[in-house]
Amino acid sequence: MATLSSTHCRSYSPLPSSSYAPSSSSYLCFKLGHRQRVSVSSGSKRFLQAKVSIQSHTNSGGRTHDGAVTTTVAPIENDIPFKKLKDGLLSVSSSDECKDAMTFDINENEPTVSITVVGASGDLAKKKIFPALFALYYEDCLPQQFTIYGYARSKMTDADLRNMVSKTLTCRIDKRENCTEKMEQFLKKCFYHSGQYDSPENFAELDQKLKEHEGGRVSNRLFYLSIPPNIFIDSVRCASLSASSGNGWTRVIVEKPFGRDSESSAALTKALKQYLEEDQIFRIDHYLGKELVENLSVLRFSNLIFEPLWSRQYIRNVQLIFSEDFGTEGRGGYFDNYGIIRDIMQNHLLQILALFAMETPVSLDAEDIRNEKVKVLRSMRPLQLENMVVGQYKSHTKGGVTYPAYTDDKTVPDDSLTPTFAAAALFIDNARWDGVPFLMKAGKALHNKRAEIRVQFRHVPGNLYNQNFGTDLDRATNELVIRVQPDEAIYLKINNKVPGLGMRLDRSNLNLHYAARYSKEIPDAYERLLLDAVEGERRLFIRSDELDAAWALFTPLLKELEEKKIIPEYYPYGSRGPVGAHYLAAKYNVRWGDGVDQ
């Protein structure tokens, strides 16, 4: 695992144990707060030879997921044992004893991390990846020895890249001191190499430049593929054969879409595994890195009041809602090839559903969590056309402003049937969730922008106050709302008495509003996921069998929609979406919470 130059970046340190071992074992020697680093590292499973650079007696080590070697280090000249600390690090009684066990200069041999953004001239790299890397640097979360390279076909110099990147960098609202100085230091770590995505020679040139910056140290390399999916394989082939690390780990972050259906996804996975092991592939879904999504398991598993209620006995329905208040706006060419179901439902919302509905994992280890998510996905019924509503936004004039239709986008065919809106009812056939509808809704050009999870609980049986609620019992239903974005919050709707002599009931919110409760700005999802990839933490990344199970749910429906050329229901730009979505919810005696909660 890459060394974090600041202990305040994260409050935990993964233990190098059998259940979880970082990709390179790290041991820290402490003496009056002074830290020195001793690294025992090796190559990735596929390409690299193990190297151990400590002269000591060692027990037989284990190999981690990336192929790194874990070993137990014993002192040479004394019998004072190493002591295991609570945070999983090792200590000795003096720094001299620690130094005696080394045969090299610690600082000179500290591992490096080289991060290469493939597709560095694209919008994603400029707007998300480079700003996220700077934020990690600004918060002292990157290793002391790191290099960032941009790689793309565009002809640019290092200065051109730095100028492009500098325009998108910002400092934390709550920590602006030395902002300009930090930016300048970060930009000095950024370099550029121009090359073709399918050229082994160009990647070999990149390899030589990386080696110059790595200076003979143990080199760990992370490649972020911010490129179209049709050139994933060529880039992975060239990077793995010509630019992978020779003595550290090599990892590759892959952006969605991961195919268009089960067949294309399986073909992509098969092709990637010709050059990479599964544990070198980090399939990123940035929604899993959002603060409120990560807090979902904390909310459920660390609060006694919620876990007993988390089942069909108390929950009437669960709603996962995603809406944007803008259309494709020039991205129609890309979007038309995928549609809202592939773009949002099959990945973002389904991943959140799996996290929400999974059983308690054995531990917080990545594999234990992902095992439980896969069980949920495999327990779900394949989607049926009768449980799906699709829509497409049309032109609408409001307040004297005319908003365009989806097909008005010049990059979209005039006769396109691609849905920009979809609503679906899904079911999990297991003991915990049998019969509970999970309603998904995602759309563009709607009346607002939001992403949230809404948990509607069952009505109170034999409620003594039914007469006070009247006929609309839905308004008396307890509801837990987890607002992922914007304006992050968690609130629980409860019923209470209005002060006064009469008996008038009111619905109120027990509200955790993040902006009011926490002064610290919430990190962007890409920051968390990039840091996880550097550290080798896979919990928030998608495993290949998860991907297979997700596509198995949606592929039959997608094929039916396309083969039958189902015409989407048209809805005005800026509206609440197709009326059919309300009929779908009513079919299961459900009312969309975002329509009531206004």
Image (cartoon, rainbow, N blue to C red):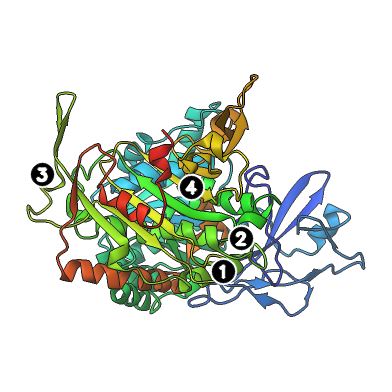
Depth order, front residue of 589/272: 589
User: The residue tagged with tag 1: helix, strand or loop?
Assistant: helix
Q: Are marks 3 and 1 in contact (CB under 8 Å)?
A: no
User: The residue tagged with tag 2: helix, strand or loop?
Assistant: loop
What amino acid type is highlighted by mark number 3? Asp
Q: Earlier in the sequence, mark 2 or mark 4?
A: 2
Q: Earlier in the sequence, mark 3 or mark 1?
A: 1
**Which is more foreground, mark 3 or mark 4?**
4
* Residue marked by disc 2: 1
Instruction: Give the side of residue 529 with respect to residue 167, left or right.
Output: right
Label 4 CA crowd tier, 10 Å (few <14, some 14–19, many 20+): many
Residue lying at the far right in this picture: please name it: 79
User: The residue tagged with tag 4: helix, strand or loop?
Assistant: strand
Q: Earlier in the sequence, mark 3 or mark 4?
A: 3
**Which is more foreground, mark 2 or mark 4?**
4
Which quarter shows the N terminus? bottom right
**Which is more foreground, mark 4 or mark 1?**
4
User: The residue tagged with tag 3: helix, strand or loop?
Assistant: helix
Instruction: Give the side of residue 291 with respect to residue 60, left or right.
Output: left
Give how far apart the Cα atoms at labels 1 and 2 are. Answer: 25 Å
* Residue marked by disc 4: 454
Query: Which labelled disc corresponds to residue 408?
Result: 3
Q: Are marks 2 and 4 in contact (CB under 8 Å)?
A: no
